Image (spheres, grey):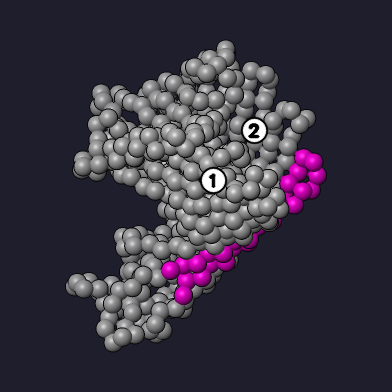
Amino acid sequence: MIIKYFNKKIIFSILSMLFIIISTSSFGQVMYNLPEKDGFSFGSYGRVGVDWSFENGGSIGRRLNLNNMGSIGGRMEEQDYLELIPAFHFAPFKKDDPTLIKVQMRFAVYSQSLSLFGNSSTSSLGGLTIAMPEIYAEAKNINGKDLNIWIGARLYRTEEVHIADHYFFDDHSGQGFGIEYKNTRFSSFFVSSTDTSSNVPPYFYLNIGNGVANIALRQRNVFILDHEFSISQKTKLTAMGEFHYMGNTEYDDAEATPLPDEDSTEIILNYPADYGFVFGVKLITKLGDKNSGAVNKFSIRYGTRIANGGDGGLSKTWATYGAPDLEKVNFAGAYAISIIDEVNFNLSENNNLNAYVIYKLNKGAAKTDGMAKTYWGREVYNKKHDLTFGFRDTHYFTEKFHLLSEFHYSQRKDGVDNMYSFQKISISPTLVPTGEKSTVARPHLRFVWSLAHYNDAAKENLYSPYLQFVGKKQWGYYFGVKMEWWI
């Protein structure tokens, strides 16, 4: 990632241009070295393109993947997306102080209606949405003691299955703080949600401590501790633990309050405190000699009670899955298992292979495996498991012409429903104008062709964003020209 520093004389002009860009449109991690003086750096990630289909003669703009899987199953068909990452760097007062200091922000832009960037704006119906997933301050290598401290909102994560765009094991992105000392890291995040349409356990409760029934916002606190062990020169093991706590309401008796309509469904607004634990290990092993770049990453993670999240293409444990036990009024007995393995190695100087397998099992606290009611009286699946495996082969025909070839297989079972599955192949001739023979070289100028086959259950139940658009089809197609960059 290329970082450019600018002296104070031109910071204000750059900032002015930046704010103009953000105001009209407004994800890539900025890294930096110690500046000789205060400075500014800028990073960006984005993708944009067009696609068409034989189904309607125009753009569909829908993934071929199964529902509730996100990018797991391949990401070649992803829609337009933009991130802008400005960072301010501060030099310590003493010139011999090795402390690294920065304040970083991140602006993300996407279209909720899946329309193209060029055809949408923030004032369009379902148009461009601007998010700010990062704004934090960090001091690294404090006084040369290998001590880092940060406070704010940040994308706090490490491992990713890139071809599935899936951050796994330790995606602790959110707002909070963290302390890192050598190979040990502690962080805490404060999670709250005002999305009352969500199927996950609500963060609301009925507060009548003052004699008046009011809806209040309940906070979840997440505490994470992990430590990295060096097993050998080629092997590292990371052990991680999490504790989740959602506090009591001021009114402790969890009574059912009827919904304000004629239905008999009941809603529990003042359910009592609950908690959860997560335990996991990650093993990273370098394969071959130190210059080959080959590596295998394996992780297994187990979550309990309200920390049984990690569905929908995401791995965040705080997004609780399933329904509670409405007799006990808690999530005792809920659990989640996540097992992921990824390998990356060079078959030759002109060929790279990246393969992965992702398995997830989530179970709520209700007694059934099928549909069950949440605190909000909604029916949700109380159990699901899914399995995906795939690979990407990158062949460097020349320095500037690369061929990306992918295969993915996914299957998912929701509750006691039939198993949904699909297979997909993608071929993408790619121009790399920088001439770098690397899987991380950018920008990419791609032609993308994808072909998917669905089983009968997926076809009949329209269990894909693509099928929901075109109807009951056994085969799905995607043609597009896309570009992707980061800096």
Marks 2 and 1 close (CB-CB < 8 Å): no
| Amino acid tagged 1 | Phe
| Residue at far bottom of view | 211
Residue 399 lies in quadrant: top right
Q: Position of residue 15 (x, y in %)?
A: 38, 38
Image quarter of the N terminus: top right
Q: Residue at x 49, y 17 (%)?
A: 433
Q: Nearer the viewer, residue 151 or 169?
A: 151
Q: Position of residue 186 (x, y in %)?
A: 62, 60
Is residue 269 shown above or below 381?
A: below
Q: Secondary structure at mark 1?
A: strand
Q: Which disc is residue 344 wearing?
A: 2
Which residues lie in the magenta part? 219-247
Q: Residue beneath label 1, please?
A: 90
| Residue at far top of view | 398
Q: Position of residue 289 (x, y in %)?
A: 78, 30
Q: Which numbered disc, 2 or 1, marks the residue that appears first in the sequence? A: 1
Q: Residue at x 37, y 29 (%)?
A: 48
